[in-house]
Amino acid sequence: YIIFESTQIKSITNIGTFDVNNPDIRYSVGENPGIKTTELAAQMYKEFGDDAGKLLESGKVKIVESVNDLPGTHPNNVQAMYKDGQVYLVAKNIDPMKVKGVMLHEVGVHANMRDMLGTEGFDNLINQMNRHLDIDNPNLEAVIDAAIPDDTPLQFRGEERLAYLVENMPEYGFVKSLISKVKAWIYKTFPSLQQSLKLTDSDINELALSSLRNYASNQ
């Protein structure tokens, strides 16, 4: 079930805090005792090489010692948080063996799919999907539309349609095209991962699905 009001919980794979004054807060939680900030930074450099330095120096990623150092009030077991375009990593709560996964999740999921593919490329993909459903498979179109919550704004139904197909029918050609482009974006954003991490189609599907629904539910 997806919630579409900006002041409600807004993410499938993350937990969202309810704050009517500042709804753009999402985070993930962990149970590990964690490490020091310097150790977390070192682990980031180990996993991402120069990409880590670029993210930290640009301010897109910030390492804090504990939840008390995060803006706002949050549960004590928050390990990472996305707020106002910035990813916060809480050293005290992060398992050093999961730094790579947390980073990919926070940066990948909260990235705008239109930024990943480019507005024109994403719109072309949506149009290709709509033509296929309207002309070649109206029965499937009816099934997908019935699964989309009634209060979904018209301008975001394309994202929800595509999310349904990514989740349930990854064999479609335009879904494979999306997955391929998301994978290319990840390796472009984190060049060091090209050699150190081989992402499976399942990994990319999950990122694409979360990004699509996160975008739709935060507008």
Image: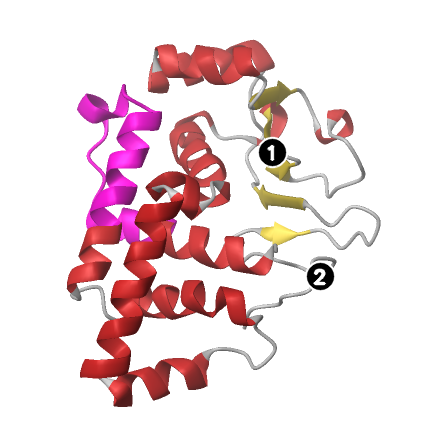
Residue 44 at x, y = what percent? 43, 18
- Location of the N terminus by quadrant is bottom right
Q: Nearer the viewer, mark 2 or mark 1?
A: 1
Residue at which label 1 appears: 85
**Left or right of 147, for residue 31:** right
Circle 2: element type: loop
Residue 145 at x, y = what percent? 42, 82
- Identified at 75% across, 24% down, the residue is 69
**Picture quadrant of residue 70:** top right
Label 2 vs label 1: CA separation?
18 Å
User: Callout 1, which amino acid?
Assistant: Gly
Residue 11 vertical position relative to residue 82 in the rendered view, above or below: below
- Identified at 21% across, 60% down, the residue is 174
**Left or right of 57, for residue 173:** left
Query: Does the CB distance between marks 2 and 1 fall below 8 Å?
Result: no
Question: Was residue 97 drawn as part of the magenta stretch in this picture?
Answer: no
Magenta highlight range: 179-207
Mark drawn on residue 8: 2
Circle 1: element type: loop
- Location of the C terminus by quadrant is bottom right
Residue 118 at x, y = what percent? 36, 41
Pointer 2 or 1: first along the chain:
2
Residue 179 vertical position relative to residue 34 in the rendered view, above or below: below
- Identified at 47% across, 40% down, the residue is 111
Is residue 166 in view?
Answer: no
